[in-house]
Image (cartoon, helix red, strand yellow):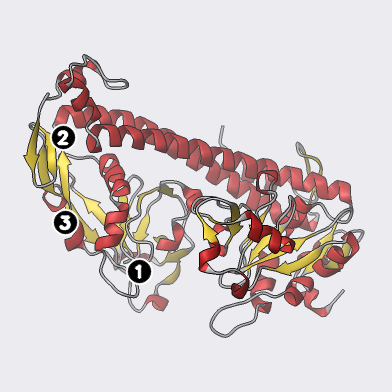
Amino acid sequence: MEPESLEISLLQLAPPTWTRTTLGEIVARGGGSIQTGPFGSQLHASDYVPEGVPSIMPVNIGDNRLIRNGIACIRESDAQRLSKHIVRTGDIIYSRRGDVKRRAIVRETEDGWFCGTGCLKVRLGHGVVVPEFAAFYLGHPEVRSWIVRHAVGITMPNLNTSIMESVPFLLPPLDEQQAIAETLQSLDDKIEQNRRTGAKLEDLARAVFKAWFVDFEPVKAKAAGATAFPGMPSETFAALPTQFVDSELGQVPEGWEVKALGSLGTVGRGSSPRPINNFMGGSVPWLKIADATASTGPFIYKTKEFVTESGATKSVAVAPGDLILSNSASCGIPMFVGLHGCIHDGWLHFRNLTQISKGWLYHFMKWKSEHLIHIADGSVQKNLNTRLINDLQLVVPPTQIHKAFAEMNDAVFLKIDAIGRESGKLAALRDYLLPRLLSGRVRVAGSDNLTYDGESSELNEFKEQAFPS
């Protein structure tokens, strides 16, 4: 065992029968490889095409999953020219620079994709380690920490093949690896299923918003002689006008108003207690832009940082159901708050809305996202300010039409919220089990058969808190 492995305590806590080794030794024994992605000189900007072989970049690496949304593609001929970078099921992909903790296992649906510039591919080979087990092991907090400490670079951490080969590794017998992987994977799969269900529900609600309030399809249908519109209550359809009138935003339904957002409520900005180091490490969740990720859906349920009670009084308090909008970095992204806490100055918040609901405004901001980026200030980093948001022009529907949409949308988002909270509990259970399974403190003989080495009441208590009956 190399000296660096002593930095990872789980190697000392695990059963003595489990093998202590390194990732490089496992790869060598299995006939695999550790390979960095192609150099920039091998792929140029002109080589990327709208459709082709998906090319994985660091931005496409989520939490043990690859993210297809917005992925770049290369031609099949370029993928074959650089065929050693084609990924296969079971490969593990790392971000080679920046956030080097991120890794994702390649699943069957991603077999044949391409390991792009800025990434590193670990191919484990056969017969030594179960790839899913390896992916979870590499996600252990101590292992992630080890990788960050050993990454090179003064301004930005960088990984290379030598660092990855040296990663200390704990290897249980193959059957136990499989059982551990199945236990953790079942939780991950349910979380992913929930994410997709929530995304589909949100897409349906957004489609209704666009039809009713962007394209004005029900009004157009009624003007053309229709007596009903799919999905719209009959009494709501009856209240629609049959004509359009000119406005500064173009033609809008007769009787609908064009108003500035600032006239419909107040827009404020979050704040950061200063000096920030004096207020960190408390118990109050402090929402920052980094807390909004693709995996959270439209709600933020947890934060990476916390401030003290006194620090929270110097910030802006938020509660579950509040709507916030990112004003810096990835500006123009609306999110709902799912907890009690306070917000960083990278967020704007909305208060005292009249005539429109927070759900209606959420969809409006989603629809205007590209416009918001366009109007944001700043040459280096784009920023939105309260004036820009206050000046946004909206087509405000009559109360009856808005109420019908709000009732439908609120019911959908209640389901999305419930799904998201369940996923949070599943993730907490996974994160609770991960270090215990990997240290042998919790032993598993199958995905439904956990035994606790010590006080079993601790595991039962955690499960009761996470999943109350």
Three-letter residue code for mark 2: Pro
Rendered residue at 31%/53% (across/down): 369
Rendered residue at 73%/54% (across/down): 436
Disc nearer the start of the sequence (3/1): 1
Rendered residue at 28%/50% (across/down): 368
Question: Picture coordinates of residue 304 (x, y %)?
Answer: 49, 62
Rendered residue at 62%/66% (across/down): 101
Spatial CA distance of label 2 from label 3 is: 18 Å
Number of marks present in the image shown:
3
In the image, residue 458 sits, relative to residue 400, either above or below, namely below
Q: Nearer the viewer, mark 2 or mark 1?
A: 2
In the image, residue 363 sits, relative to residue 67, either above or below, namely above
Q: Nearer the viewer, mark 3 or mark 1?
A: 3
Q: Residue furthest bottom?
A: 154
Three-letter residue code for mark 1: Gly
What residue sits right under mark 3 in the picture? Answer: 390
Q: Could you tell me if the residues under marks 2 and 3 are in contact, i.e. CB atoms within 8 Å?
A: no
Spatial CA distance of label 3 from label 1 is: 28 Å
Q: Quadrant of residue 215?
A: top left
Q: Which mark is residue 397?
A: 2
Disc nearer the start of the sequence (2/3): 3
Q: Residue furthest top?
A: 227
Spatial CA distance of label 2 from label 1 is: 41 Å
Question: Picture coordinates of residue 334 (x, y %)?
Answer: 34, 51
What residue sits right under mark 1 in the picture? Answer: 311
Residue at disc 3, secondary structure: helix
Three-letter residue code for mark 3: Asn
Disc nearer the start of the sequence (2/1): 1
Asked if residue 465 shows in the view, the reply is: no
